[in-house]
Amino acid sequence: MKKIQNRYVILMISSIINFVHGNPYIWTVFQPYVREEYGLTLAASSQPFTIIIGIFAVGNMIGGFLQHKIGAKATILAGSAVMCGGFFLAAVAPYDMPWLISAGYGVLGGLGSGCAFSMLVAVPQAWFPDKRGLVTGITIGVVGISGVLMNPLCDYVLAAHGYRTAMVLVTVIYVVLSAGAFFIEEPSKEYIDRMELKTAENRSKNVLGNVRQYTTREMLRTRMYYIISIVMALAIPAYVLVNPLMKSLGIERGLSNSQALMGVLIASFANIIGRFVAPWISDRIGCKAIIRVMYVISMVSILALTVARGGVFVLLISLVCMVYGGVVSVFPVLVAEKFGMKYQGMNYGAIMLGYGIVSVLCPYLLELAGQEMSFVIAGIACAVGLLGTGLF
């Protein structure tokens, strides 16, 4: 097979494949059906979502490790195979074994998805050292588009044919799109060196080419690693607590079924906007400034959601989703700025460990503290994260 060397083609292919890694965002329409079909509690039916978000971080680290052993292409293909296998397992889970949904969709799906996703972000970044923020926004932005297109499709199939058929359909779509990984190629070392030098010549400050290339072990010894990991993790509760409940909570807050689904779509568009716009702005005003703005928006929105109803509820949900999209798009750029690009896959995965731990703990917070108090705690977490940005 002839190697593709055009960096814009590589970016396009990576972005198309990244569509499949919007897989957590379909759970908001799956959750009510799974809860009813399997007779689960609210927290239990949200667990597959929180597990896939949490395990995703571990998958990122595995992907970064495998890149240096078997290459990016093989890593993407292997991760995609594990993810799709997990989704199929979730689709055929017997009614007396609902834990297989969490094991398949959550654990295997998260590991495989994280493994492939880390490469689909790192490889385009390596091809575009001169436009890392923009390119990261594009590749991660497509993940958000996935929710906009897949949620209505899944909702229709769920209503017409039930959970199992809908999950099998999702699996088939993801298998087809993941096959595009056969055309992914990494840039040569000579290309990277040439582009880094060109970037250094064109920028007077904040030159990533001059950043020390930290290995993951070296990064873990720095104070900055723990600061960035904790600050990123503090942004997560607001979104993770809200996302799987968007549709069902919207109905409780006075929306009809169709209005609640429309609210999910609007929130998905907001997620996309955050993913594209936040890293683009970070190229101009810096990561620290845009992260601070996002924390303020998220803090105010999640606290107001304790009482919001109707259209205001949709607006606030959308702002929370927009911030989340921005957070997951800007932090990879921040990590590259602080620790270099050479080990970006593993390094960003390590940064996301705090993100993963918090994601897994959120259902227990919801169960122990209740919905409204959980939102208050998430708002406090945003306030602490805002203060933490002063340590970057």
Image (tube, rainbow, N blue to C red):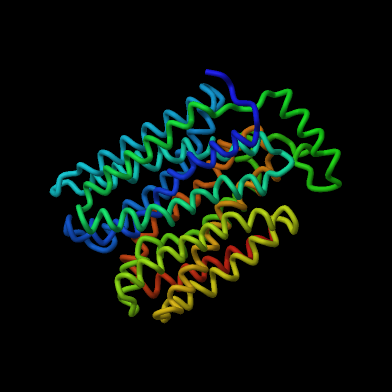
The image quadrant that residue 129 belongs to is top right
The image quadrant that residue 82 belongs to is top left
In the displayed structure, would residue 162 be above or below residue 289? above
Residue 216 in view, yes or no: no
Of residues 40 and 355, which is closer to you in this image? 40
Q: Position of residue 274 (x, y in %)?
A: 57, 59
Left or right, 344 with respect to 54, comes to right
Of residues 378 and 78, which is closer to you in this image? 78
The image quadrant that residue 174 belongs to is top left
Of residues 219 and 177, which is closer to you in this image? 177
Please tell me which residue is depicted at 29% across the width and 44% down the height of the picture: 169
Quick one: which residue is furthest to the left in this view?
96
In the displayed structure, would residue 211 be above or below residue 261? above
In the displayed structure, would residue 102 be above or below residue 69? below
Left or right, 340 with respect to 116, comes to right
Q: Position of residue 164 (x, y in %)?
A: 21, 47
Please tell me which residue is depicted at 58% across the width and 70% down the height of the picture: 297
